Amino acid sequence: MTPEKNPEQGRRGFLKQVALAAVSAPLGANLVAAAADVAAPNQPPDNAAGPAPAVGYASLGPDEAGFVEAMVNVMCPADPLTPNGVDCGLAIFIDRQLAGDFGRGARLYRQGPWAPGRPELGYQLPLTPEQYFKAGLAAAGDVCRTTRGKRFEELSPEEADVFLQELAADKFTGGHFSLGEWFNGLVYPLFEQACFSDPLYGGNTNKVFWKMLGYPGLPATHANDMVEFRGKPYPGARDPKSIADFS
């Protein structure tokens, strides 16, 4: 999925732009009433990421995982050079983030009061990010069944792409959710992080996105190398190094 239907902008150009500019849209403040409804609870060999690791989900339930897997496969479809989103580890990354300190809101102030705030104030909800993510999945699934007559996972890739575009444009109303704020403020940033984070965290399997960008990983901290090789291919980018490679 791409934010704009620009025929001159391929998937790779889009991902390169994402790597250079992080999205920081604030989350909405209109979910206070929803808190009670949410349970707490053939490819070149050097770029082939291979199948997703056989790791169980720590946060997502079966239906939630089905939605997320379908979603990341639409947002990161397979092509002749890279696998689909699931095989790139994107769903695993999202699940691990939700199951960890980020998902639990470990660094968020959560004592209230929960009055609506200005967008620049950022996250102003009683829900943890994990609860908010799951509540949004449930709401998006309900909207999909209502408007499309089928589950999101059952949509064709083209239908699913259109549906996600409509979510991002906040075209669906009802209930306690601004699905546009949910998608743009929480889901999409997690997708970006899954693509370009260190593989240690579950996404970017086999450093596939780093290789696509020519990013060498941790060696990029060598300032002299950055000056010497500015505008030229960096030899280390052929074999990027992650945190795990230095541990």
Image (cartoon, rainbow, N blue to C red):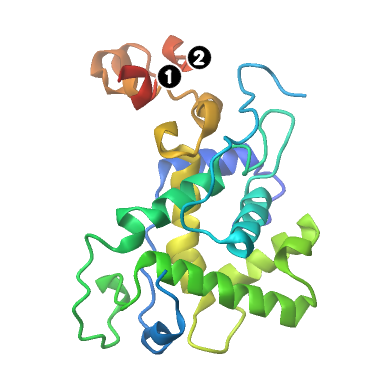
Q: Earlier in the sequence, mark 1 or mark 2?
A: 1
Residue type, numbered disc 2: Arg
What residue lies at 45% left-to-right and 40% top-to-bottom? 19
The residue nearer to you, when weighing 203 against 160, is 203
Q: In the rendered view, does 7 fall on the left or right side of 140?
A: right
> Mark 1 and mark 2: span between their CA atoms?
16 Å
Reply above or below: 206 against 45: below
Residue 198's spot in the image, x, y percent?
A: 40, 33
Residue type, numbered disc 1: Gly
What residue lies at 32% left-to-right and 62% top-to-bottom? 104
Residue 245 visible from this viewpoint: yes
Q: Which residue is mark 1?
A: 231
Reply above or below: 218 against 149: above
Q: In the rendered view, does 50 fall on the left or right side of 242?
A: right
Q: Quadrant of residue 13?
A: top right
Q: Which residue is mark 2?
A: 238
What residue lies at 49% left-to-right and 74% top-to-bottom? 135
Q: Nearer the viewer, mark 1 or mark 2?
A: 2
User: SS class of the residue under badge 2?
Assistant: helix
Q: Quadrant of residue 129?
A: bottom left
Check contact, mark 1 vs mark 2: CB within 8 A. Answer: no
What residue lies at 27% left-to-right and 23% top-to-bottom? 221
Label 2, residues with CA under 10 Å away: few <14, some 14-19, many ≥20: some
Reply above or below: 147 against 120: below
Residue 169 visible from this viewpoint: no
